[in-house]
Amino acid sequence: MGETILSVKGIAKRFGHIQALRDATLEVARGSITALVGDNGSGKSTLIQILSGNLLPDRGEIQVGEACCHGLTIRRAMALGIRTVYQDLALDDCKTSVENIFLGSELTRGPFLDRRAMAREARRLLEEIHVEIPDLTEPVGRLSGGQRQGLAIARALRRPGELLLLDEPTAAMGIQESHSTLRLLAGLRDRGMTLLIISHNLHQVFALADYIYVLRAGRVLTGTATGDTTVDALQEQILRREREEDRL
Amino acid sequence: MSPLRKWCARRSVPLLLLAVCLGLMAFLSVRTQSFFSLKNVVNILEANSYRLILACGMMCVIASGAIDLSAGSILSFSAIGAAMAMRAGAPVWLAILLALALGTAMGAVNGLIIHLTRINALIITLGTSFLYRGMSLIATRGIPITKLPQGFRDFGFGDVFGMESGVTMSFLVVLVLIPFFYHMRWGAYVTALGGNPEALKRSGVSTGRYRISVFALMGALAALAGIIITARLNSAEANAGLDMEMDAICAVIMGGTALRGGSGSLLGTVIAVFLLGLIRNGLTILSVSSYYQQFITGALLLCAVAAAELRERGRRTG
Ligand SMILES: Nc1ncnc2c1ncn2[C@@H]1O[C@H](COP(=O)(O)OP(=O)(O)OP(=O)(O)O)[C@@H](O)[C@H]1O
Ligand SMILES: [Mg+2]
């Protein structure tokens, strides 16, 4: 494993009486793709939101590069180069594709929005990641699930950053779209970016990730290099752990 | 779709309202010889300048996914503040600044409470509307403050381009709002507050700033409307502006801005205010009893909302 860019230690987070995270500990190597898998409600999205500064953990430590902190704010996470594609995508349905891609980081000329430059840049970005949206000046509320995910990815890629967190980025995509997205993500790694990706599709995970962490009931169970395990082994592992927990 | 058709499709509500306006004007000028004069249009503009100012502020608030029921109370209290200051010997310009500052502050308090508590704006501003109205009543003991200095009264009747100064001010408000609302970050973030505040927050924007500023703007514009009304009446009253926020909300919704927020139509708001004024004016000219006015306004609002809703459904399914 190469140099560690992100290290998470003993993160815990509680919502009312639900302990979403108990003891999340993992490390992400610079320039790698790390996958986070686990059942529904195992706390994956909660961890991503904590790493993005959208939630504060109750306990634990986050280290990004040299910076070490207990919790992050959204701005701090952004300043540290963390970009996120949220599970709910965080799109404003009333705004157009262009406006959504640039929300919070608009291009301006003086005090005014530079719509032409933003439209040009958005078109280029979407072309690069093979997302086809016929009319970029229509509200995004009417786009398909895959197109919306494409937009969210385009927005995350627009801002400079070296750590990309993706929460089920291809869940709503068709075969062709998810293939091109996966190719894109692999391409980003080759360009030196670091990716932490959540997915329920183990085959996809195996095709893409260098390292896999399994999250179960808010606890990180295992971390293995992809080469040291197989889909069946991993599935078996998750199931066995599940039975163990049931017995407790 | 051709650019022209798209432009029209996007502005179908304002265009429809405009058509209704023109039809009404044509009808009125046929029925009465006196109507279709420029003078009458100016009359309508003059009688509705403060309504337009209030509606512009309300449009921004509604676009941000909120509502302000306290605008009328803010109007009254800031005007009373100015009147009391002038009675105590303050110069006119200072009194006006004071009114604007009071209005801005009261609006900002609304925004701050809503941002901090995350309680629905309807409830919070319902509360503050009683609070601010109560402050007006306490400060005046219900007695109007009259006999204001001439320099202040000029604000109501002062002649700019042959029209009351209120008209100029309302046009200025619209002209200043166009770039802020449509072409700058402020408008983009205010509408995002209505569309998806979580998305705005997650893109690193401090949402409180925009929540507070949009309510502060509403407050400042309510104060401006209060100044115009008070100057015209030569009297500041605790009951001034009663129910005026409802007129403003009515015009905004009629103008095609959805109550759920996310986007807003300044053009539609302007035309809707004018249309409502035109109806009031036309009924007077036709000597129809004012009892019918509210009924017709209500019917028109329902029709406008129904038309907007049908169009939206047609889009979703078609
Ligand atoms: N804001 C919240 N308030 C209350 N409970 C929450 C909140 N967010 C998450 N939870 C709870 O925390 C647990 C973990 O949720 P999380 O979204 O992290 O799961 P997940 O692993 O992403 O699941 P999925 O695969 O379905 O996306 C769940 O039981 C969920 O109900
Ligand atoms: Mg999730």
Image: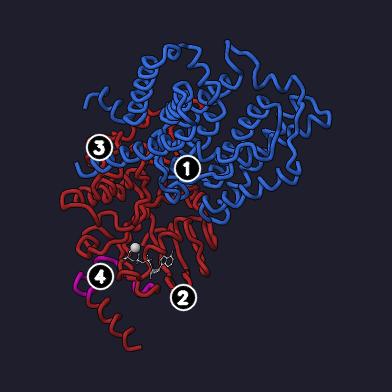
Q: Amino acid at mark 2?
A: His
| Residue at 55% across, 33% down | B54
Residue occupied by mark 1: B64
Residue occupied by mark 4: A228
Q: Does the CB distance between marks 2 and 4 fall below 8 Å?
A: no
- Neighbor class of circle 2 (other Cα within 10 Å; few <14, some 14-19, many 20+) is few
The part of the image, by quadrant, that contains residue A118 is top left
Shown colour of chain B: blue
For discs 1 and 3, the disc positioned in front in the rendered view = 1
In this picture, is B159 found above or below B13? above
Circle on res. A127: 3
Q: Are marks 1 and 2 on the same chain?
A: no
A169 is within the stretch colored magenta: no
Q: Earlier in the sequence, mark 2 or mark 4?
A: 2
Q: CA distance from mark 1 to mark 4?
A: 52 Å
Q: Are marks 2 and 3 on the same chain?
A: yes
Q: CA distance from mark 2 to mark 4?
A: 37 Å
The part of the image, by quadrant, that contains residue A240 is bottom left
Residue sitting nearer the eye, A60 or B56? B56
Left/right placement of residue A85 relative to residue A108 reads: left
Q: Are marks 1 and 3 on the same chain?
A: no
Q: Are marks 1 and 4 on the same chain?
A: no
> Looking at the image, which residue sits at the far bottom?
A247
For discs 1 and 4, the disc positioned in front in the rendered view = 1
Q: Tell which subunit mark 2 falls on.
A: A
Residue occupied by mark 2: A17
- SS label for mark 1: loop
Q: Amino acid at mark 3?
A: Glu
Q: Tell which subunit mark 1 falls on.
A: B
In this picture, is A141 found above or below B52? below
For discs 2 and 3, the disc positioned in front in the rendered view = 2
